[in-house]
Image (tube, helix red, strand yellow):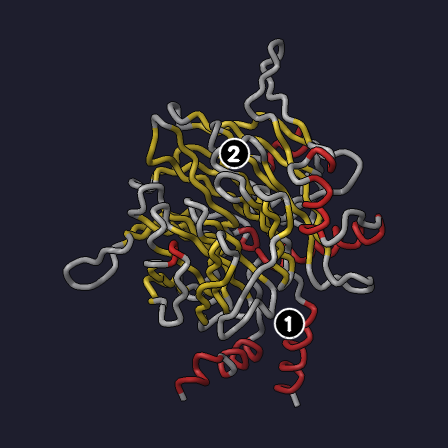
């Protein structure tokens, strides 16, 4: 009876689980992709129209929430993965799925090397898998490709994956406050992967997670530096070759002046960093924060002095827009943002996605010296209303739906980032029910 209750609770929680909306931008801004739930929506900015995806693989399209969307540096490939344990590789010329790989566990993060030779994905058990992409850039389908495990985080869910700019390292972050730098893909003579690990200890146990990582660089610093966002509301600057912490920006400590309330006892994760994005054409890092900040925080990264500092808060007026995912191209000063969730209960639409964009990061006010960034009106976003129709599912979103989604989103982001605590009985039951153990019996 007790096991039946535990199983029913798990199934109910799984059915009620919501996923935040994600956004990815083509490196030269030829297209924009949004994922909400199992739905992948793409708009082609080059042709000015919505994309019709083709998937003739053995496992067509995603059947469960997509948790990762990533373009390759050359823009030829798009990788999607998620809770259905499927990793799909799409060719962006024909917008067809050319390969589907089945993971042992649900997938939480993906990355593609800058040279386009490899993709890596991480599963919910903390294992990172690698697969070569030979032939994929020529739109060649492959059903024989297999991924191989290269490292594990000892049962900790990986939240973010990045290749270093030169491709020598794969960097992974997890929900147990660790960032790991692993040599990729060469092995030592004894066949063991070489790796470096650097980490920090955050006092509050429920805030000990790294939510996102990204590289920031410039022509003078081609190898770049790593920036990370975490549950203690800090953004940190790292030198990955030495593992040195170069600087820490206490975003949460500036809560009052940034225009959002400091976290209260009822939700200590309220100002957690949920996503960050380096803006390649300038030394800026855009930061999305869980909580009541409708907009993003801009950080300036002084690469010569190796420091981070808050430059500006960009607020979105007139609506509660708390970004769940942000992205940009390598050649534009446009920052794309999405907010939204899947499995929205009690409304005609089961999911919501709202897309916004900010421009003007290279424009400086001659008097104040501040960046003259602008939140674009819907009609001024590249692709206009047709883009919003495709990526959002509808141009107009009712206010009550938007407010309900905002509340659902707060809970979803907390559940996504905070490590779950189980009773001894439930933990043992979950171990017995693991699919990988079932398959080995």
| Residue drawn at the location 23% of the way across and 55% of the way down | 186
Q: Are marks 1 and 2 in contact (CB under 8 Å)?
A: no
| Residue drawn at the location 64% of the way across and 57% of the way down | 36
Horizontal relation, residue 348 to residue 238: left or right: right
| In the foreground, 80 or 30 | 30
Residue matched to label 2: 285
Q: Is residue 226 visible?
A: yes
- In the displayed structure, 311 sits above or below 17; it is above
Horizontal relation, residue 408 to residue 361: left or right: right
Q: Mark 1 falls on what kind of element?
A: helix
Residue 105 picture location, percent across and down? 48, 71
- In the displayed structure, 387 sits above or below 382; it is below
Residue 396 picture location, percent across and down? 80, 47
Mark number displayed over residue 140 = none
Image quarter where the N terminus lies is bottom right
Residue 74 picture location, percent across and down? 41, 45
Residue 358 picture location, percent across and down? 64, 33
Residues at marks 1 and 2, CA–CA distance in whole angstroms: 34 Å
| Residue drawn at the location 51% of the way across and 27% of the way down | 300
Q: Mark 2 falls on what kind of element?
A: strand
Residue matched to label 1: 14
């Amino acid at each position: 009876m007790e096991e039946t209750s535990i199983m029913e609770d798990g199934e109910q929680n799984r059915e009620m689980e919501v996923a935040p909306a994600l956004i990815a931008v083509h490196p030269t801004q030829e297209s924009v992709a949004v994922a909400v739930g199992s739905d992948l929506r793409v708009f082609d900015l080059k042709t000015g129209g919505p994309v019709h995806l083709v998937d003739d693989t053995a496992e067509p399209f995603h059947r469960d929430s997509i948790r990762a969307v990533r373009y390759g540096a050359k823009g030829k490939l798009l990788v999607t993965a998620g809770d259905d344990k499927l990793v799909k590789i799409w060719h962006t010329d024909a917008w067809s799925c050319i390969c589907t790989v089945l993971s042992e566990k649900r997938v939480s993060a993906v990355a593609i090397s800058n040279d386009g030779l490899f993709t890596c994905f991480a599963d919910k058990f903390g294992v990172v898998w690698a697969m070569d992409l030979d032939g994929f850039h020529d739109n060649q389908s492959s059903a024989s490709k297999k991924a191989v495990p290269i490292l594990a985080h000892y049962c900790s869910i990986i939240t973010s994956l990045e290749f270093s700019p030169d491709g020598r390292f794969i960097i992974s972050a997890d929900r147990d406050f660790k960032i790991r730098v692993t040599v990729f893909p060469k092995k030592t003579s004894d066949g063991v992967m070489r790796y470096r690990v650097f980490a920090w200890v955050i006092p509050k146990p429920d805030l000990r997670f790294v939510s996102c990582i990204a590289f920031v660089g410039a022509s003078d610093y081609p190898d770049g530096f790593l920036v990370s966002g975490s549950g203690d509301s800090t953004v940190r600057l790292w030198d990955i070759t030495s593992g040195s912490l170069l600087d820490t920006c206490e975003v949460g400590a500036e809560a009052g002046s940034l225009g959002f309330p400091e976290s209260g006892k009822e939700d200590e994760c309220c100002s957690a960093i949920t996503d960050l994005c380096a803006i390649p054409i300038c030394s800026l890092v855009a930061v999305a924060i869980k909580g009541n900040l409708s907009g993003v925080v801009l950080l300036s990264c002084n690469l010569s002095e190796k420091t981070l500092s808050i430059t500006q808060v960009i607020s979105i007026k007139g609506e509660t827009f708390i970004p769940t995912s942000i992205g940009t191209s390598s050649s534009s000063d446009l920052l794309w943002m999405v907010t939204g969730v899947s499995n929205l209960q009690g409304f005609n639409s089961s999911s919501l996605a709202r897309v916004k964009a900010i421009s003007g990061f290279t424009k400086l006010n001659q008097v104040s010296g501040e960046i003259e960034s602008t939140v674009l009106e819907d009609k001024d976003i590249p692709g206009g209303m047709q883009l919003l129709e495709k990526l959002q599912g509808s141009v107009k979103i009712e206010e009550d739906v938007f407010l309900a989604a905002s509340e659902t989103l707060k809970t979803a982001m907390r559940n996504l980032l905070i490590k779950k605590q189980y009773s001894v009985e439930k933990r043992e039951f979950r171990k017995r029910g693991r699919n990988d153990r079932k398959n080995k019996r």
